[in-house]
């Protein structure tokens, strides 16, 4: 499915689901404009480990304009701390990427997600798992057979996180804006009939 068709097929904003002090909800470009700087700073904190490894992930250095563009493309979901009302996590299903992506992402029946991030202050509390569950459910609803992602190959902890959640390595890709190879990982979400 073409990226423009994916964006056009997006459902309306879904209701948030409270879960352990975390509200999961769809990003809304009009309502959430004030959250762009806090999302950007949260991304910088979440990707700091990779930056400290000498890597240059886009999410670890993107500015507010790029953050807005990315969150406004595809289906972006936020994890919001119910007490502070600040974003503590983000993920994008079917981001409309300005650069050519890996061939695996273009395969029939494959959808992808990007920019999964959880604020380091709440990592290990299931927020990342909850965000993954949201995009996995949406991929199933959109009749995807596979849900794929791209991640920095040198980040062994992140690779193990995805493997624990059922993702397998299916390829390697080099994005033009990074200084490392990315692993392309995928998970079967619906068995082909």
Image (tube, rainbow, N blue to C red):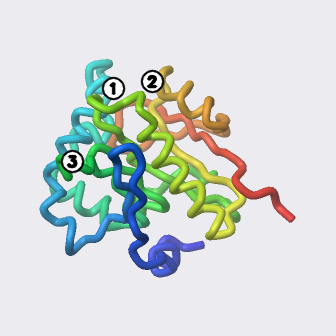
Give the x, y percent position of residue 186.
64, 44
Which quarter of the figure is the C terminus placed in?
bottom right
Which quarter of the figure is the N terminus placed in?
bottom right
Mark 3 or mark 1: whose residue is earlier in sequence: 1
Residues at circles 2 and 1 in contact by the CB criterion of under 8 Å: yes
Mark 2 or mark 1: whose residue is earlier in sequence: 1
- Mark 3 — residue? 83
- Give the alpha-carbon distance from disc 3 to disc 2, as whole Å: 32 Å
Question: What residue is shown at x 26% (from left), y 29% (from top)?
Answer: 121
124 lies above or below 147: above
Give the x, y percent position of residue 169.
65, 35
Element class at badge 3: loop
- Mark 2 — residue? 155
Q: Quadrant for residue 42, please give it.
A: top left
Question: What residue is shown at x 27% (from left), y 47% (from top)?
Answer: 81
- Give the alpha-carbon distance from disc 2 to disc 1, as whole Å: 7 Å
- Give the alpha-carbon distance from disc 3 to disc 1, as whole Å: 29 Å
- Mark 1 — residue? 50
Which is more foreground, mark 3 or mark 1?
3
Element class at badge 1: helix
């Amino acid at each position: 499915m073409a990226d423009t068709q994916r964006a056009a097929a997006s459902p309306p904003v879904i209701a948030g689901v409270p879960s352990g002090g975390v509200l999961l909800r769809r990003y809304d470009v009009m309502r959430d404009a004030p959250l762009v700087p806090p999302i950007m700073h949260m991304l910088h904190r979440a990707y700091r480990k990779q930056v400290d490894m000498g890597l240059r992930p886009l999410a670890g250095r993107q500015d507010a304009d790029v953050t807005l563009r990315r969150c406004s493309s595809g289906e972006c979901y936020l994890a919001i701390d119910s007490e502070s009302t600040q974003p503590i996590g983000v993920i994008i299903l079917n981001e409309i990427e300005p650069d050519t992506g890996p061939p695996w992402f273009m395969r029939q029946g494959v959808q992808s997600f990007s920019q999964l991030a959880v604020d380091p202050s709440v990592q290990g509390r299931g927020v990342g798992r909850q965000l993954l569950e949201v995009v996995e459910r949406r991929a199933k609803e959109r009749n995807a057979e596979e849900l794929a992602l791209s991640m920095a190959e040198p980040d062994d902890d992140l690779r193990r996180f995805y493997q624990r959640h059922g993702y397998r390595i299916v390829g390697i890709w080099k994005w033009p804006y990074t200084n490392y190879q990315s692993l392309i990982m995928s998970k079967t979400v619906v068995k082909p009939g």
